[in-house]
Image: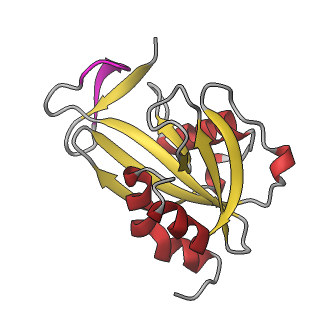
Amino acid sequence: MELNDIYDAERRLTGRLHQRGTPWKPGEYGLVACVWVYDGRGNLLLTRRAREKSYPGTWENSGGAAKAGETSRAAVARELFEETGIRAPEEDFELIDSARGRDTFFDFYCLERRVALRDIVLLPGETDDVMWASFDRVHAMIRRGQISAVIAAQFIRQETALKARQNIQK
């Protein structure tokens, strides 16, 4: 059973816990942290969601819900390691965006890492493939429906910030 901290609408911890998989009550919020890993050469690391997950077979950046007691940066570092085997200290993650959804606060990070695909360790039941994709390829994948609408919206919203880190012109 996974527990998550409950935040109020102002993103203050309430001291209460939420059991993952159960509905959130009005005014309760969880925390999700995601990361765009980039190689400094114009590519983003994407993983494909395992067939047994929601949005099966679609491509995404790494991320997930913060567990009870975890900070946003601790959660993103853990999720990246679990989904890819990439270890990075919390201070290496650069916050590029935050948002609030219906019942979730989202923090979006970027991280520069040059990792060979053969060195990626996928987590069975979570991810089943990995690729480096150029910005043009990500746009083509969005058009073909290979990236879920939620992840596509994140990418579009954060694309300028991600390109700036790789010195890519619009």
Q: Identify the colour scheme used.
A: secondary structure
Q: Is residue 38 above or below residue 62?
A: below
Which contiguous range is marked in magenta?
A: 13-23
The x and y percentages for residue 61 are 56, 51
Q: Is residue 115 above or below residue 64?
A: below
Residue 18 painted magenta:
yes
Q: Nearer the viewer, residue 68 or 162?
A: 162
Q: Residue at point 38% right, 60% down? A: 153
Query: Is residue 97 found left or right of 81 in the rendered image?
Result: left
The x and y percentages for residue 96 are 47, 64
Q: Residue at point 51% right, 69% down? A: 139
Q: Quadrant of residue 50?
A: top right
Total marks shown come to 0
Q: Residue furthest left?
A: 26
Q: Residue furthest front?
A: 144
The x and y percentages for residue 16 are 29, 20
Query: Is residue 96 found left or right of 86 in the rendered image?
Result: left
Q: Nearer the viewer, residue 2 or 84?
A: 84
Q: Quadrant of residue 87?
A: top right
Query: Is residue 29 found left or right of 60 in the rendered image?
Result: left
- Magenta-drawn stretch, dominant element (helix, strand or loop): strand
Query: Is residue 105 found left or right of 70 in the rendered image?
Result: left
Q: Residue furthest top?
A: 1
Residue 89 painted magenta:
no
Q: Is residue 47 above or below residue 29?
A: below
The x and y percentages for residue 165 are 61, 75
Q: Residue at point 33% right, 45% down? A: 105
Q: Residue at point 74% right, 74% down? A: 41
